[in-house]
Amino acid sequence: MGGVDEAVERTLEAVGPRLKRLRLRREVTLAELAEQTGISVSTLSRLEAGLRRPTLEQLLPLARAYGLTIDELVDAPPTGDPRINLRPLACSDGSVILPLTRRPGGIQAYKFVLPPGSDDAEPDLRTHEGYDWVYVLNGRLRLVLGEHDLILKPGEAAEFDTRTPHWFGATSAGPVEYLSLIGRQGERAHVRAAPRYGPAE
């Protein structure tokens, strides 16, 4: 595992300069990027300078702002089955992001694995442009959404406009795995219900 850990460490160290190159190449100011992502100018500056490691809540709106998947945003090293070339990204807070789609733009799918959390954790609510659908696979997911503090169990789902202040976390009961579909503002999933048939005649 040493080689994998070293590769992840090198990837995380290179995120700051990469974020700065992306922003300058697209001629976007820190103030403009802050408005698009909901991340403060000072935090963006620290991320680009390598003085702060990015978190899940920061990588998602940044990837959306640049029209990239998260693995493209950080240039993560390829791992896993090379036929699929999924590129999991380990974050400094112990969480792991596994991209499930490759196309930039449109709805993107991710699997998230969060380590056990603290029930007394103070949520750091974020807002950004977009729409999110969440489905819990294993464990318990704490979702703070505006004034609501929810615990989602396996098989439960939630959808919301990400302009609503929100935060995700695991509980002290253990780690949590969940799927997330993230789309642009106004982009909604099309739900098709099975036709309802009456009793056979």
Image (tube, rainbow, N blue to C red):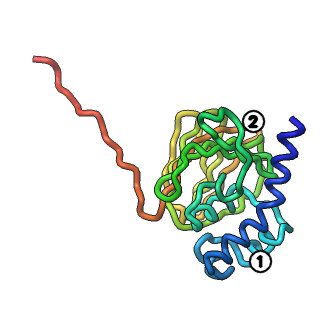
Residue occupying the point 59% across, 66% down: 66
Depth check: 87 or 150 in front?
A: 87
Residue occupying the point 85% across, 43% down: 5
Residue occupying the point 53% across, 34% down: 155
Image coordinates of residue 1 in percent, x first then y, are 86, 35
Count the numbered circles shown: 2
The kind of residue on which mark 2 rests is Gly
Where's the C terminus, which quadrant?
top left
Image position of 196 with respect to 90: above or below: above
Residue occupying the point 83% across, 65% down: 52
Q: Which residue is mark 2?
A: 174
Nearer-N-terminus badge (2/1): 1
Looking at the rendered structure, the secondary structure element under dot 2 is loop
Q: Which residue is mark 1?
A: 42
Depth check: 165 or 94 in front?
A: 94
Residue 197 is left or right of residue 120, and the answer is left
The kind of residue on which mark 1 rests is Ser
Looking at the rendered structure, the secondary structure element under dot 1 is helix
The image quadrant that residue 55 belongs to is bottom right
